[in-house]
Image: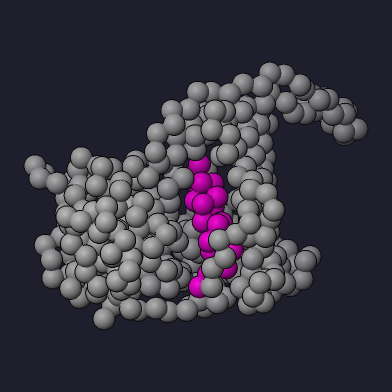
Amino acid sequence: MSSKLKVAVIGAGYWGPNLIRNFSACPLTEVAAICDANPQRLEAIARNYGHIRGVASLDELLEMPLDAVAIATPVSTHFPIASRCLEAGLHVLVEKPLAGTVKESQALVELASARERILMVDHTYLFNNAVRRVKALIDDGELGDLYYVDSIRINLGLFQRDINVIWDLAPHDLSIVDYILGGDARSISAWGCGHAEQDVEDMAYVNVDYGDRLMANFHVNWLSPVKIRQMIFAGSRKSLVFNELNSTEPIKVYDRGIELGEGTAERSRLLVGYRTGDVWSPYIDPGEALQAVVSHFATCIRDGERPVSDGELGLRVVRMLEAASRSIKAQGGRVVLGGGVMGSGANGYGDARAERSGQRDQGRAGRPAGTRRDHALLR
């Protein structure tokens, strides 16, 4: 393509202005329109981007000559908006999570394939240089065999009414682990509760079984008095800590761990030695992850490539989110991805027999607690 891609941004609230700024700065794209049902938001955007046309409805937007859209609206509107745009022949970048249910996510993936359009989910962390370095270190065997992942993403909220804390915060870390491991989870269990609103969980703990004795724990919370963004990847050789809030040394690799006796007798007596070695931090190019997102989206459209955060990855994340919500309703009952709830209560783990490869559960059509539909943009 010799000319720039004409992109429209749908939704000018919290995340929309960031997309507008990055698409405007990307040499492969130009922002042709901004769509939002709120006239005050359009007026605010016009102060900095007066040359960009503002429209109040999706109908009006789809009458314009466009190549692609970026959707930054409430989760409950992702499916109706994205499906209309795909049906209109447009490539689609949609804010995480892909949709409000597995059924809707699957439908979007199938529609994009049928229309031969790019469907990409804005899982921004997959384009973070630190996260990419973590993947490279693990792929190169620097950590050995992974034992567990421990993730904490907590702060004193941005409270939301249409989704709970799992659907808001957990997609970040679930997508990171999916990207790094490159395989499906087997089962999931979650506990959570709401304090500001009883029906909307504002804190939760999620446990995921990835098979091969690899477990991952995710703590997400809108109530914490401190902000923590940290992931630990522990392996048989070394361990790694990714601290997003440490701008100078976001990654630290620890040559620390345990060593078991080599002989059968030593192992039977559980003779464990402790290894303490060096700690090092690789240099990470700061870069802006969202600029990498929009550039990758444009490149995939231009070259017909498959996005890193394609609809299939987005579907896997939504499958885990929906299963986690089911588990909470079952008091922590373990949900086999591809099956049902295995028991109930805090000890209801059950038997996660599902294989890691090829799990494609269609899921139930239930939405996360508190979900509401707002189709103002669809009129």
Question: Residue 255: x and y, percent?
Answer: 68, 23
Closer to us: 225 or 203: 225
For the point 25% across and 42% down, the residue is: 26
The quadrant where residue 322 appears:
bottom right
Question: Which quadrant of the rendered structure holds the N terminus?
Answer: top left
Residue 321 image point, x, y percent = 54, 64
Give whichever of 118, 93 is nearer the camera: 93
Choose top left, top right, bottom left or bottom right for residue 286: top left
Determine the residue positioned at 68% across, 49% down. 226
Magenta stretch: helix, strand or loop mostly: helix
| Residue 109 to residue 139: above or below | below
Residue 164 within the segment the image draws in magenta:
yes
| Residue name at image x 55 percent, y 50 percent | 173
On screen, residue 371 above or below 53: below
In the picture, measured across the screen, residue 294 lies left or right of residue 230, that is left
- Residues shaded magenta: 162-180
Q: Is residue 277 above or below residue 341?
A: above
